[in-house]
Amino acid sequence: MNTFLRCLIALVLMLAMMLNTTPVHAEDGYDLWLRYRLLAPEQAGLYRGHLSQLVAGSGTPTQAVTRGELQRGLAGLLGHEMPLSDTVTRDGAIIVGTPKSSALIEHLSLNTQDLGNEGYLIRNVVVNGHTATVIAGREDIGAMYGAFHFLRLLQTGQPLDHLDLRESPHVKLRLLNHWDYLNGQVERGYAGTSIWDWWKLPDWRAPRYTDYARANASIGINGTVLNNVNAGATILTPEYLQKVAALADVFRPYGIRVYLSIRFSAPVEIGGLKTADLLDPQVQAWWRAKADEIYKRIPDFGGFLVKANSEGQPGPEDYHRTHAEGANMLADALAPHGGVVMWRAFVYSQANPDDRAKQAYTEFKPLDGRFRANVLVQVKNGPVDFQPREPFHPLFGAMPKTPLMMEFEITKEYLGFATHLVYLGPLYEEVLSADTMAHGKGSTVAKVIDGSLDDHTLTGMAGVANIGTDRNWCGSDFNQANWYVFGRLAWNPSLSSRAIAEEWVRMTFTNNEAFVKPVVDMMMGSREAAVDYMTPLGLLHLMGPGHHYGPAPWDASESRADWRPVYYHRADHQGIGFDRSRAGSDAVDQYAPLLAVQFNDVKQTPEQFLLYFHHVPWDYRMRSGNTLWYELVAHYTRGADDVKRMLETWRHLDGYIDKERYNQVATFLAIQEKEAQWWRDACIAYFQSISGLPLPPGYVPPQHSLQYYQSLSFPYVPGFSSW
Amino acid sequence: MNTFLRCLIALVLMLAMMLNTTPVHAEDGYDLWLRYRLLAPEQAGLYRGHLSQLVAGSGTPTQAVTRGELQRGLAGLLGHEMPLSDTVTRDGAIIVGTPKSSALIEHLSLNTQDLGNEGYLIRNVVVNGHTATVIAGREDIGAMYGAFHFLRLLQTGQPLDHLDLRESPHVKLRLLNHWDYLNGQVERGYAGTSIWDWWKLPDWRAPRYTDYARANASIGINGTVLNNVNAGATILTPEYLQKVAALADVFRPYGIRVYLSIRFSAPVEIGGLKTADLLDPQVQAWWRAKADEIYKRIPDFGGFLVKANSEGQPGPEDYHRTHAEGANMLADALAPHGGVVMWRAFVYSQANPDDRAKQAYTEFKPLDGRFRANVLVQVKNGPVDFQPREPFHPLFGAMPKTPLMMEFEITKEYLGFATHLVYLGPLYEEVLSADTMAHGKGSTVAKVIDGSLDDHTLTGMAGVANIGTDRNWCGSDFNQANWYVFGRLAWNPSLSSRAIAEEWVRMTFTNNEAFVKPVVDMMMGSREAAVDYMTPLGLLHLMGPGHHYGPAPWDASESRADWRPVYYHRADHQGIGFDRSRAGSDAVDQYAPLLAVQFNDVKQTPEQFLLYFHHVPWDYRMRSGNTLWYELVAHYTRGADDVKRMLETWRHLDGYIDKERYNQVATFLAIQEKEAQWWRDACIAYFQSISGLPLPPGYVPPQHSLQYYQSLSFPYVPGFSSW
């Protein structure tokens, strides 16, 4: 007995030593919000009675990945494998499935019919006299989404008793748009190169593809456009479709469909035809045959995304046809297979002397009602181009007969690339909650997007992905939050961006309240900080030419007037801003009448959009009582100061999380601090050279001369297609 | 007591369950050969008496990383932390340091003087009456190399008693050459993009840089050229030198110096001068000032690598100066700081009608003796360009007054990119052991390189890196072996490539003999298989144009004759091969007289070089008694069959290692099998169209027509600078 005891002690010590070994893999962000690290003992204790066995089938690929994710997640969170069982044999079972796949669930007679294809419910039930939690969908995919929701409850420390959740997505197509070229470059990508290793596909299906699908499925994303909207024709060749099909195979169990950006002139480039004119029967036949070929390989192929007659891309207007005619021709080819066309409204022309911000509306509004039922028009959130702040796009609410799809940018092209900490939740929320007044008060953009305003069932939201080969996927840990919040808002555009930020922080870092609260606060303020140090008060498009890095409000090097900062800010000795009132470009009248009146009046225009709608004298009195010039300097300064405070906040949080991620965030915040100061100083130096006004008292002058800022140049800026 | 026992049992069970948890991180190759996984119990048992405590200082950065690596390695291998101690207090201590850093070691009165700056000894000793193992260098770096050697002993299952090892490197400069562009592209890179994140440097020093340094230090690599030999001038701007300095700071503790490829015309491009002529005093002054600037930031900067007047790069010949004059001008700028110039001999000109293989010798041989003492001439292993097989470069042995540096290619530009399993050890060994006969028999290339043949102390070996952002660094697990064997041979060019392969397999995968033996055999045969399915019997340069992917012996699309396969194989109705005999280009006379006679005689020429030196009739009788045509088909077929067997071998090894790496290797071998067949079939189809001969009996005809193979085209081939 004594020997046995000594033996046991030795064993315990040995095991303890093994556990004590330095982990081989440092935290590197790869796991995203699906970290599944051991819960704190007090929290694990809370769950003990609820997590005794897993009753889940694996009869279909989706069931298998659902069960696998629960096993993986629970093992990680609880520190031990969850026993599988065919039926409920004790209290605390977790039952997962659909009435079709599980007799147990069928017997529970839950109302799964109303959940739709993707919805789920999570509820505490009693089975065979034992307490259990049921995660049920009408379809496998719904149960999978429920499983991820259930894991999220654990990851965020939610109680598991009295569960009675019902969720269905509010938007049908929840898509990532990858601006990835086939050579591996990612346009406006700041996280390495494309995660699609086209060269080794279809043979090599990298494990990362599966992790990509897991991450997307966990937040409800159900589609992905694999290639850049500036598309070549090669993606439609048989060789590449084989590669696309391999990816589709990986994604399918996770409910994710693949879509492709197509080049309108592909029938000429790879089809051997002399024209791509949609009225040519050979062209129509080519697209039908191509669609047939695609669906033969990929039966659940999603459809086409099209950038046509925009920034040099070919399109129907090359043949004097309308965007609607172009979209419809493709829609007809896809319709027999259930595919959709997502036609981008991002069009403007240098040849058109009208305000660039007005051109999409001018071109698309008259086409309302002219699109096939399987066409969505994809509209960027604002009328210019993903700026730190823009008013919502006037097309929202203005095309009631057409499903309008939201296009957000997740990658931070205009918001500091990889290194600035800018949480985009508040930007998305601001746009979605904006009231178009299209059918009177309460006609929010969210209701346009989710189809409820004009009774559309075909609805969608797209986010331009910030994903690349960087180990942490997104170039920084905090950029992962932007992928996360996009997915969550695409599922339900009415969610609060703060609540989502909190979820994300808990899942990604820790449930420690002393960490969660300040970090969520920092995230929530970060976008306003960026607006302030880059483009406050309705300014926009002040960044460096082409590469979009850093401040260059003076720049006139771009070939097109409407790509130059001076086109947008129009600063002169009198004042600053773009007059879009009725006295100016009259962009205000693209909004609903009540809004148009408001935006037309400099006094009624929200100050955050002031210089977007009006050219305003430097000495204009703001609501604060200060002059515009004073407020401009104050905003720029506040933005830079906010970043200093963010860095301070972070430095106080050393020790709450792993050293690796703590250090990278700290380093990046220091870069952001430096660059925010640079933005503030360069913009103030430039605008002061035009206003001729002294700095308001108490404000520190720019560190360097305007000439210094103008002299800076940046070779090899990432994300810019100059390879 | 009973309660205590129950308690203990519960604890054991809990701990066992925790250990049983699925590991969060799958094996992904990131750890390279420094995996440090738990040793098998029987092996760990062997070491128990030898590994009780670690006596190692951390007073300098190199000491700190040495101690850290031992702690990390021992903890991983043994499963528990190794206690640190200031002195030896029990049997089995490990003592690490130098006589300067450790009084303990000083007292041992070991002969460390003869070890040089980088050498070390490892020996069992008795200290304070306790057995111990001492790892000592004359300098910190030597002790660090010794520590890695000691860990390798454990990793490969060597006994730790009766240790009496002394090692010093045989070659002074052991360098990687990165063909990385500042935009992230890697020329001839098949493992993602550049690991240098220039954009975020100098602020963000990615942890990967440290792991890169650890891996290199573990195999003795002591320098790295960060940028492509096709260099721009930007790397020499103050902004980029700041970034270079940050990397140098990371590498310094590991004994690794940074070097840069420079552009000869930089004084014009970033210096504002009108000329880059080396005779211009302003140009000389510019380079001196630039060198001073570099050394101010990086006191141990290594020097410059120069590709001049080669494939379009600028150089001294633009001003009618010689390569020696060009090299010397740069050498004079670096000499005050102890830097070197590595001047590449890879020159050939389209304007020169002479055999391309002869041109480097013709140009450089007359310059022997004209270079400054701090110049090395860097020569590729063969006279053409890193082909699967070439004879050694005739410059080796031909420039006795000049230190010749070897340039090997580690990246598999001509050997199947990422996916073919081709272990390059035998290629390197074949070249190093080749006898130049320069001073009679035994004048091997290795002796030229290590300086022993002509008494040079400045010696060097460079390998064109196969490293990129891919998680596994090298694009495949087996490509890691090529990085490894390069480093080990640079340390000692006389090592056996088989012994190195075995070391690597044990460290990278497992010590299980049932795995080690077949895998080492497979590796050792893999290069000959590639020669056979690509370019047997002295053929070379038959690959696709520009991108170098796949077979294209017919190709004539390249702009330069000496870039076209037909220039090299010269197949016609009579026969095949490049006549380099005295009746032909007389390249044979660039070799030492005895070799020249041998290579000049078709009968004496080794058959593996037959078609390199001779144009031979199709019906020529080979030593086997078969015709050349028969042997050619037989070699191609054998190569393809060998790959089938490699895949078979691998499939029998399922279960010996982790699923992740097993699967990737299996997938890549299947790709290689397909591509080896393609090479075999396309080459046979083409050569048959020229020879007009029937296939020998029993040989399967190509799967497709020659026209089919000729019709294939490949967009977006990796590693090719077409971004």
Image (cartoon, coloured by chain):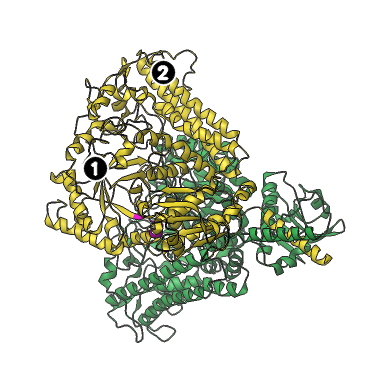
Chain colours: A yellow, B green
Q: Give residue A586's quadrant in the image.
A: top left
- Where's residue A61, x and y in %? 42, 63
Q: Which residue is mark 2?
A: A631
A228 or A432, which lies in front? A432
Q: Give residue A456's quadrant in the image.
A: top left
User: What subunit carries mark 1?
Assistant: A
- Where's residue A422, x and y in %? 45, 35
User: What subunit carries mark 2?
Assistant: A
Residues rendered magenta in the picture: A252-257
Residue B388 in view, yes or no: no
Which residue type does callout 2 highlight? Glu
- Where's residue A658, x and y in %? 60, 44
Badge 1 density bin: few <14, some 14–19, many ≥20, Cα 10 Å: few
Q: Residue at x 40, y 46 (%)?
A: B314
Which of labels 1 and 2 is toward the front?
A: 2
Badge 2 density bin: few <14, some 14–19, many ≥20, Cα 10 Å: many
Question: Residue A254 lies in magenta, yes or no?
Answer: yes
